Image (spheres, rainbow, N blue to C red):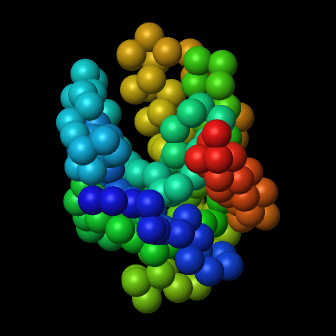
Amino acid sequence: MDLSPLSPSPSSGLVNLVVEIPAGSRNKYEYFAEAGIMALDRVLHSSVRYPFDYGFIPNTLAEDGAPLDAMVIMEEPTFAGCLIKARPIGVLDMHDSGAYDGKLLCVPIADPRQSSISSIRQIAPNQLEDVAEFFRTYKSLEGRVVIIDGWRDVEAVDSLLERCIEAEKARLKN
Protein backbone atom coordinates (compact mmCIF):
# COMPACT_ATOMS: atom_id res chain seq x y z
CA MET A 1 0.00 0.00 0.00
CA ASP A 2 1.99 2.96 -1.32
CA LEU A 3 0.47 6.19 -0.01
CA SER A 4 2.89 8.58 -1.74
CA PRO A 5 0.52 9.34 -4.68
CA LEU A 6 -2.32 10.36 -2.33
CA SER A 7 -2.95 14.05 -1.90
CA PRO A 8 -3.48 15.03 1.74
CA SER A 9 -6.25 17.34 0.56
CA PRO A 10 -7.91 16.28 -2.72
CA SER A 11 -9.85 19.56 -2.84
CA SER A 12 -10.54 22.55 -0.64
CA GLY A 13 -12.26 21.57 2.59
CA LEU A 14 -11.55 17.84 2.18
CA VAL A 15 -8.85 15.43 3.34
CA ASN A 16 -7.86 11.90 2.53
CA LEU A 17 -7.88 9.96 5.77
CA VAL A 18 -6.35 6.49 6.15
CA VAL A 19 -7.95 4.52 8.99
CA GLU A 20 -5.53 2.75 11.30
CA ILE A 21 -7.93 1.85 14.11
CA PRO A 22 -11.66 1.18 13.74
CA ALA A 23 -14.07 2.57 16.33
CA GLY A 24 -14.58 0.22 19.26
CA SER A 25 -11.14 -1.39 19.00
CA ARG A 26 -8.55 -1.83 21.71
CA ASN A 27 -5.98 -2.91 19.12
CA LYS A 28 -3.69 -0.05 18.09
CA TYR A 29 -2.59 -0.51 14.50
CA GLU A 30 -0.09 1.75 12.77
CA TYR A 31 0.85 2.11 9.13
CA PHE A 32 4.26 0.50 8.59
CA ALA A 33 5.51 2.54 5.62
CA GLU A 34 8.63 0.46 4.97
CA ALA A 35 6.48 -2.61 4.22
CA GLY A 36 3.39 -0.75 3.01
CA ILE A 37 1.07 -2.55 5.43
CA MET A 38 -0.80 -2.03 8.67
CA ALA A 39 0.89 -3.56 11.70
CA LEU A 40 -0.34 -4.26 15.22
CA ASP A 41 1.56 -1.79 17.41
CA ARG A 42 0.04 -2.74 20.75
CA VAL A 43 -3.17 -3.63 22.56
CA LEU A 44 -4.45 -0.99 24.95
CA HIS A 45 -4.11 -2.31 28.48
CA SER A 46 -7.28 -0.73 29.72
CA SER A 47 -10.96 -1.16 29.03
CA VAL A 48 -11.12 2.03 26.92
CA ARG A 49 -11.81 1.70 23.22
CA TYR A 50 -11.37 4.09 20.33
CA PRO A 51 -14.50 6.26 20.13
CA PHE A 52 -14.24 6.94 16.36
CA ASP A 53 -12.37 5.48 13.42
CA TYR A 54 -8.87 6.87 13.91
CA GLY A 55 -6.00 7.33 11.51
CA PHE A 56 -3.91 9.90 9.71
CA ILE A 57 -3.70 12.24 6.76
CA PRO A 58 -1.11 10.79 4.34
CA ASN A 59 1.80 12.90 3.14
CA THR A 60 1.72 15.22 6.13
CA LEU A 61 4.16 15.67 9.00
CA ALA A 62 2.91 16.88 12.36
CA GLU A 63 5.01 18.38 15.15
CA ASP A 64 5.27 14.98 16.88
CA GLY A 65 7.18 13.58 13.87
CA ALA A 66 4.29 11.46 12.57
CA PRO A 67 1.58 12.17 10.00
CA LEU A 68 -1.27 14.43 11.14
CA ASP A 69 -3.75 12.43 13.23
CA ALA A 70 -7.42 12.40 12.32
CA MET A 71 -10.67 10.85 13.50
CA VAL A 72 -13.81 10.33 11.47
CA ILE A 73 -17.35 10.03 12.83
CA MET A 74 -18.87 6.88 11.33
CA GLU A 75 -22.15 5.08 11.96
CA GLU A 76 -20.32 1.75 11.53
CA PRO A 77 -16.61 1.07 12.03
CA THR A 78 -14.56 0.58 8.87
CA PHE A 79 -11.22 -1.30 8.87
CA ALA A 80 -7.50 -0.67 9.12
CA GLY A 81 -6.26 0.62 5.78
CA CYS A 82 -9.58 2.05 4.62
CA LEU A 83 -9.27 5.33 2.70
CA ILE A 84 -11.99 7.85 3.54
CA LYS A 85 -12.50 11.18 1.83
CA ALA A 86 -13.63 13.37 4.70
CA ARG A 87 -14.54 16.93 5.67
CA PRO A 88 -12.65 18.22 8.73
CA ILE A 89 -14.95 20.01 11.20
CA GLY A 90 -12.56 20.80 14.05
CA VAL A 91 -9.34 20.08 15.92
CA LEU A 92 -8.67 18.53 19.31
CA ASP A 93 -5.66 20.41 20.67
CA MET A 94 -3.54 18.33 22.98
CA HIS A 95 0.05 17.90 24.09
CA ASP A 96 1.47 14.42 24.52
CA SER A 97 4.67 14.18 26.56
CA GLY A 98 5.30 17.89 25.90
CA ALA A 99 4.81 17.82 22.10
CA TYR A 100 1.79 19.29 20.32
CA ASP A 101 -0.37 16.42 19.02
CA GLY A 102 -3.46 17.97 17.40
CA LYS A 103 -6.10 15.69 15.94
CA LEU A 104 -8.58 16.55 13.19
CA LEU A 105 -12.21 15.56 13.70
CA CYS A 106 -13.91 14.77 10.39
CA VAL A 107 -17.11 13.47 8.82
CA PRO A 108 -17.10 11.24 5.73
CA ILE A 109 -18.42 12.79 2.54
CA ALA A 110 -19.77 9.35 1.50
CA ASP A 111 -22.41 9.47 4.27
CA PRO A 112 -25.39 11.60 3.18
CA ARG A 113 -26.68 11.68 6.78
CA GLN A 114 -23.68 13.78 7.71
CA SER A 115 -23.68 16.09 4.69
CA SER A 116 -24.95 19.05 6.71
CA ILE A 117 -22.29 18.77 9.46
CA SER A 118 -19.65 21.45 9.00
CA SER A 119 -18.67 22.43 12.55
CA ILE A 120 -17.89 20.79 15.88
CA ARG A 121 -20.69 22.97 17.27
CA GLN A 122 -23.02 20.44 15.62
CA ILE A 123 -21.54 17.58 17.67
CA ALA A 124 -22.91 16.92 21.16
CA PRO A 125 -20.58 18.34 23.83
CA ASN A 126 -20.65 15.05 25.77
CA GLN A 127 -19.47 13.21 22.64
CA LEU A 128 -16.53 15.62 22.30
CA GLU A 129 -15.71 15.18 25.98
CA ASP A 130 -15.79 11.38 25.54
CA VAL A 131 -13.11 11.71 22.87
CA ALA A 132 -10.94 13.95 25.05
CA GLU A 133 -11.39 11.61 28.03
CA PHE A 134 -10.40 8.62 25.91
CA PHE A 135 -7.03 10.20 25.11
CA ARG A 136 -6.51 11.36 28.71
CA THR A 137 -7.23 7.88 30.06
CA TYR A 138 -5.37 5.62 27.66
CA LYS A 139 -2.25 7.76 27.49
CA SER A 140 -2.05 8.26 31.25
CA LEU A 141 -2.36 4.48 31.74
CA GLU A 142 0.70 4.17 29.49
CA GLY A 143 2.56 6.58 31.78
CA ARG A 144 2.47 9.54 29.40
CA VAL A 145 1.65 13.09 30.40
CA VAL A 146 -1.23 14.41 28.29
CA ILE A 147 -2.70 17.89 28.39
CA ILE A 148 -5.99 18.42 26.59
CA ASP A 149 -6.15 22.06 25.52
CA GLY A 150 -9.69 21.76 24.16
CA TRP A 151 -11.48 21.83 20.85
CA ARG A 152 -11.20 24.42 18.10
CA ASP A 153 -13.76 24.76 15.35
CA VAL A 154 -13.34 24.28 11.62
CA GLU A 155 -11.55 27.64 11.17
CA ALA A 156 -8.45 26.13 12.83
CA VAL A 157 -8.15 23.24 10.37
CA ASP A 158 -6.63 24.88 7.28
CA SER A 159 -3.60 26.39 9.01
CA LEU A 160 -2.77 23.15 10.84
CA LEU A 161 -3.23 21.05 7.70
CA GLU A 162 -1.11 23.43 5.59
CA ARG A 163 1.72 23.45 8.17
CA CYS A 164 1.76 19.64 8.16
CA ILE A 165 1.73 19.41 4.36
CA GLU A 166 4.59 21.91 4.07
CA ALA A 167 6.58 20.14 6.81
CA GLU A 168 6.35 16.85 4.90
CA LYS A 169 7.42 18.54 1.64
CA ALA A 170 10.43 20.03 3.44
CA ARG A 171 11.32 16.65 4.96
CA LEU A 172 11.26 15.00 1.53
CA LYS A 173 13.59 17.67 0.08
CA ASN A 174 16.25 16.95 2.72
Q: Left or right: where does residue 143 sit relative to residue 165?
A: left
Q: Is residue 62 visible?
A: yes
Residue 7 is situated, as x and y percent measured from the top left of the image, at 53, 69
In this rendering, the answer to whether 101 lies above or below 92 is above
Q: Left or right: where does residue 13 sit relative to residue 18?
A: right
Q: Left or right: where does residue 52 sit relative to residue 166?
A: left
Q: Nearer the viewer, residue 59 or 102?
A: 59
* Residue located farthest toward the top when viewing the structure as drawn: 143
Residue 43 is situated, as x and y percent measured from the top left of the image, at 22, 29
Residue 167 is situated, as x and y percent measured from the top left of the image, at 68, 46
Name the residue located 31 percent from the left edge and 41 percent from the top edge.
34
Q: Is residue 107 visible?
A: no
* Residue located farthest toward the front when viewing the structure as drawn: 174
* Residue located farthest toward the bottom when viewing the structure as drawn: 112
Name the residue located 71 percent from the left edge and 53 percent from the top edge.
166
Residue 48 position by quadrant:
top left
Quarter of the picture holding the C terminus = top right
Residue 73 position by quadrant:
bottom left
Q: Nearer the viewer, residue 95 or 117?
A: 95
- Total number of numbered labels? 0
In this rendering, the answer to whether 22 lies above or below 138 is below
Name the residue located 22 percent from the left edge and 40 percent from the top edge.
39
Residue 32 position by quadrant:
top left
Quarter of the picture holding the N terminus = bottom left
Name the residue located 28 percent from the left edge and 37 percent from the top edge.
28
Q: Left or right: where does residue 38 sit relative to residue 13?
A: left
Residue 153 is situated, as x and y percent measured from the top left of the image, at 73, 59
